[in-house]
Image (cartoon, grey):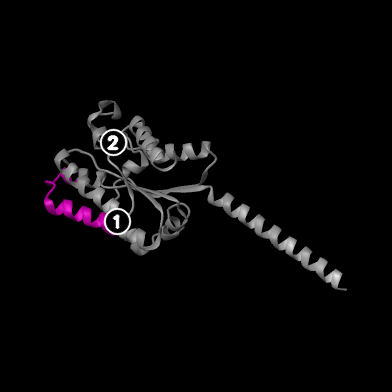
Amino acid sequence: MKIKLKRRYKLLLIILIGGAITFLINTTSVKSKIDLVSIGDGLSLGMTPYNVAGNSFNDYIKEYLEKKNKLGSFNNEFSESHLRIHELNDYLEDNTLGRFTRLPIKQVLAKADVITIAIGIDELADISLYEEISTKIIEDYLLEMETLLKTIREFYDKEIVIISLYPAYNFERKDAVEINQVLSKIAAEYNAKYLDIIAYSLNESYFLDKTSYYMNYLAHKRIASEIINMLFE
């Protein structure tokens, strides 16, 4: 009788150990996949002078992860052309639903492993067409960016990459430099990585049309390469 009980206990132990190992393997397999989320304006979408989206740096990161068999999912439904930073913060406050998946933004961010944020180029370029970029406009933008990062960090420990600003229309280089200096400090404060791309704006080969501030696929490939080196290599 005792021998039979011992055999049953051994069998049960083997089953439990086997189940635990299977669970760990499956969990590790799932976690090895990377869920990429893009939030931002036209830059994050790869907008072109022709008012259509091309390949963005996010698309190239996605392709890289797919080739490495590391992509879990990709979500860019909270990237919108001419989206303003206060609108993005409103999305978080209201827990807005995605246009396609109908998932709330907080759920999308909760699932993410990597979040890229590129926002401000459209907003400041648009403003510059009808008024001067004042100190208040700069301060408001930076305050909204800090609010965005603070909100995300209150709930989520994710890998975050912030993309800098660069001159656009009447949004001048000196203003972009001023903002970027503070933006890099905000990124560091909230344990986010920061990529300064202002030097790219000096490279004419990175633009399709001199009348547009949107960068072409060559610039987006370079941005993607920088981020890939930061995070994955």
Query: In this view, which residue lies farthest toward the top?
Result: 205
Q: Earlier in the sequence, mark 2 or mark 1?
A: 1
Please state which of residues 150 and 75 is positioned toward the viewer in this rendering: 150
Which amino acid does the dot numbered 1 rest on? Glu
Residue 122: give x, y in percent of width and height: 26, 44
- The magenta-colored residue range is 127-149
Q: Is residue 110 above or below residue 44?
A: below
For the N terminus, the image quarter is bottom right
Please state which of residues 49 and 194 is positioned toward the viewer in this rendering: 194
Q: Residues within 10 Å of mark 1 (few under 14, many from 20)?
A: few
Secondary structure under tag 1 reads helix
Q: Is residue 101 left or right of residue 163?
A: right
Residue 208: give x, y in percent of width and height: 30, 28
**Badge 1 is on which residue?**
87
**Badge 2 is on which residue?**
214
Magenta highlight on residue 140: yes
Q: Is residue 89 visible?
A: no
Q: Is residue 159 visible?
A: yes
Query: In this view, which residue lies farthest toward the right?
Result: 1
Residue 204: give x, y in percent of width and height: 25, 26
